[in-house]
Image (cartoon, rainbow, N blue to C red):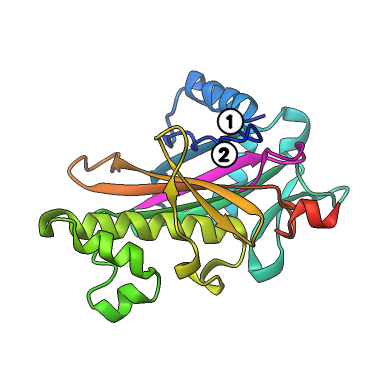
Amino acid sequence: MNAGAGSGRGPAAPVPAVPVGAHTPGPVWNGLRRALTTAGHAVVYGVAGDRPSAEVLLAVARRLLPDRTRDRLAVARGPHRRPHLVDRVSGRPAPVDVNLSHTADLVVVGVARTGGPAGTAARIGVDVERVDRLVADRPSMLARFTDPVERRRLAAVPDATRTAAVSRLWTCKEAVAKADGRGLGLDLRTVVPEPGHDGRGEVAAVRGGARAAVTARLVAHPARPGERYWIATALLYDVDPRTGADRKETA
């Protein structure tokens, strides 16, 4: 069980993303497998290439899962075209949830264990965005994904750092929406991350009862350290990993 999950203090913050590439040594992957076991999830990022998203998801999942299952994985699509992994022999869902995000230069993959008891993360969402990307260049655009309280907070941020603050908030909301499964079909104005109990992340309510732990951290491009990105990870709790429905309602 994730630390803090189900404890009454709220879910624990997601773990940081780890850079990987073609020459990443075995000990790094071993550490990621341990994170998947102990923290319940792992997140990696690297330079974006030409491979389709499904191939990238499979490549990462195969590096993290046991030998007996990795070669039988296939990508399927659920509601809202959200990807998930299945055993292509039995047709059963894989014991992990996966999610992917990319820019023109960077790709991020999140993997989370599923099938745990109530209070453990069931679905993962990730998002990546350049820190200096102007997500909302007009007040009307900002109003499409923020509520009035968030807009007041952003208005108080100094001009020099406001673009980065808006970009960070956007990635957090996007990650939650992707964990939820509806993506941009979810009204992002209703996803309001608030500081979590441990001070290292935020918690947002989704679908009434479900909780999402979310945080965004700064990373540098592996090949161009001067370029910085937000990588946001959201862990959605107490939902069915395949449909996103509240597990307490469907039990």
User: Quick one: label 2 or label 1, which is nearer the N terminus?
Assistant: 1
- Residue at figure coordinates x 34%, y 64% from the top left: 149
The outermost residue toward the bottom is: 140
The residue carrying mark 1 is 4
The boundaries of the magenta stretch are: 106-123
For the residues marked 2 and 1, what is the alpha-carbon distance in whole angstroms? Answer: 6 Å
Question: In terms of depth relative to the viewer, which is nearer, 57 or 84?
Answer: 84
Report crowding for label 1: few under 14, some 14 to 19, many 20 or more residues within 10 A (C-alpha). some
Element class at badge 1:
loop
- Residue 87 in the image: state x and y as whole percent: 80, 47
**Do the numbered discs 2 and 1 sit on residues whose CB atoms are within 8 Å?**
yes
Report crowding for label 2: few under 14, some 14 to 19, many 20 or more residues within 10 A (C-alpha). some
* Quarter holding residue 183: bottom right
- Magenta span contains residue 116: yes
- Residue 38 in the image: state x and y as whole percent: 61, 24
Q: Amino acid at mark 1?
A: Gly
- Residue at figure coordinates x 74%, y 60% from the top left: 243
**Side of 133 where 171 appears, left or right:** right
Magenta segment's dominant SS is: strand
- Quadrant for the N terminus, please: top right
- Residue at figure coordinates x 52%, y 22% from the top left: 31
* Quarter holding residue 71: top right
Taking 140 as reference, is 149 above or below it? above
Taking 47 as reference, is 153 above or below it? below
Element class at badge 2:
loop
* Quarter holding residue 30: top right
Question: In terms of depth relative to the viewer, which is nearer, 228 or 121?
Answer: 121
- Residue 159 in the image: state x and y as whole percent: 12, 60
Q: Which mark is residue 10?
A: 2
